[in-house]
Image (cartoon, rainbow, N blue to C red):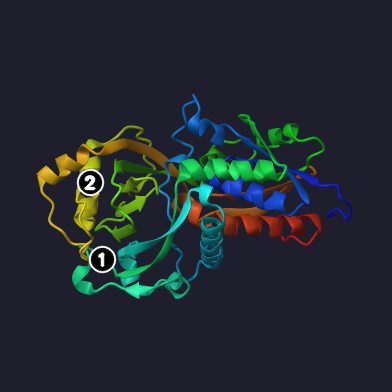
Amino acid sequence: MLPFNNEKIPVVVVGSGVIGLTTAVTLQRTQRYQVTVIGRDTPDDLHGPLSVSQNWASPFAGANWRAYSEAHELQLRMAEEQTYFRLRDIAQESPKSGVKIIPIADFGANQKERAQTPAFLYYVKNLQKIERKNWPLNAAFGYSYDSVIVNVLQYLPWLAAELRRLGGVIRRATLDHISDALKYADGCSLIVNCSALGSATLGGVMDKNMYPVRGQTVLVKAPNVNLTAMRPSESADKATYIIPRGNGAVILGGVFEERSNELHEDTRTTDEVLRNCLSMCPQLLDQGQFTGTFRNAVTDDDIQRLRKNILSVSVGFRPARKGGPRLEVQRERGVTIVHNYGQASYGFQTSWGYASLVVHILDAALTGKAKL
């Protein structure tokens, strides 16, 4: 039962990535729950002396908002739309969050989008067509609209600060079993599992449907770039995307290498990313005004010039799941667990939507209305 007095229900959120932190903030804001977040890595590590695990996907994200749901994926579609408008609000209300509204030049995420206009184009703001003559190679379509960029190194600490401001707690811990989370909150019998790739090996979960999708991105100094852009590749394991961080640095990508565990940079991938991104956006090098075309010739000398502006090359692993994200209730020995993980490469752009669903599911579970 939900309390009818001022007593809050203790709940532990396992996982301190963007899904875990957003879920924790959303639960704490209801004023019905007292939230403790447990993480092996925490946002405090991002600007501290500790190294960040490459299996913690959130700090290695671009990140921007771009929807990926297909027509039949109604839950994902709702999460994308809700998150789009929530991130817009954050950008306007909280300048220190690292979230900004900027235009995107969107040429499709994959070739399937040639056949059917993605649903999100019906609700994004300031939608305009891009003339076909300015499309890059392999484009599925061409539109510009208001997107949202997220400087993850600002945003994750901002989420943590929001949680603490609301009265939530973040604790560092490594769990062997999901039930171990109960030790970190007195009288707790509720767990929200947002452990991402950790769900593959966490006792009591051991989800064999989880697998890593390797990404490799290049961070360059390019203060003249003031839009985000993306286009599909000829192969499903690659795409070209350009995401400003809002501080003069720009993330360039990238690859989607399923089930790869390679931790180190592939220099050939780096060169390919530089070439593909520069062909779409000469402003990565040129201080001149944008000419309107996303199809430009690139020379080897251009690549070498851009190499001199590299700030870092990062490899991270997206938490993908066969069958899509897991969002469901599990009850075992008097403990209620809500699973919320497996958002792969779209964690940031669905985070607020999935967090809202967790609140509804948890409320329903406690009132006996949840369908297990």
Residue at (51% x, 62% y) in the render: 84
Characterize the local packing of mark 2: few (<14), some (14-19) or many (20 or more) Cα atoms within 10 angstroms: many
Question: Where's residue 81, x and y in %?
Answer: 52, 66
Considering depth in this image, is 321 or 166 the residue closer to the camera? 166
Where, by quadrant of the figure, is residue 271 drawn?
Answer: top left
Determine the secondary structure under disc 2. helix
Residue at (34% x, 35% y) in the render: 262
Considering depth in this image, is 55 or 86 the residue closer to the camera? 86
* Residue 42 seen in render: no
Considering depth in this image, is 109 or 97 the residue closer to the camera? 97
Question: Where's residue 45, x and y in %?
Answer: 52, 31
Characterize the local packing of mark 1: few (<14), some (14-19) or many (20 or more) Cα atoms within 10 angstroms: many
Q: Nearer the viewer, mark 1 or mark 2?
A: 2
Considering depth in this image, is 5 or 259 the residue closer to the camera? 5
Marked residue nearer the N-terminal end (1 or 2) = 1
Q: Amino acid at mark 2?
A: Leu
Assign the N terminus to one quadrant of the image: bottom right
Give the residue pinned by disc 2. 274
Assign the C terminus to one quadrant of the image: bottom right
366 lies above or below 305 = below
Extreme residue toward the top, this view:
49
Question: Where's residue 314, x and y in %?
Answer: 35, 37
Where, by quadrant of the figure, is residue 38 drawn?
Answer: top right
Residue at (52% x, 51% y) in the render: 95
Residue 182 placement, left or right of 250: right
- The total number of labels drawn is 2
Give the residue pinned by disc 1. 139
Residue at (58% x, 56% y) in the render: 352
How far separated are the C-alphas under marks 1 and 2? 18 Å
Question: Where's residue 57, x and y in %?
Answer: 46, 41
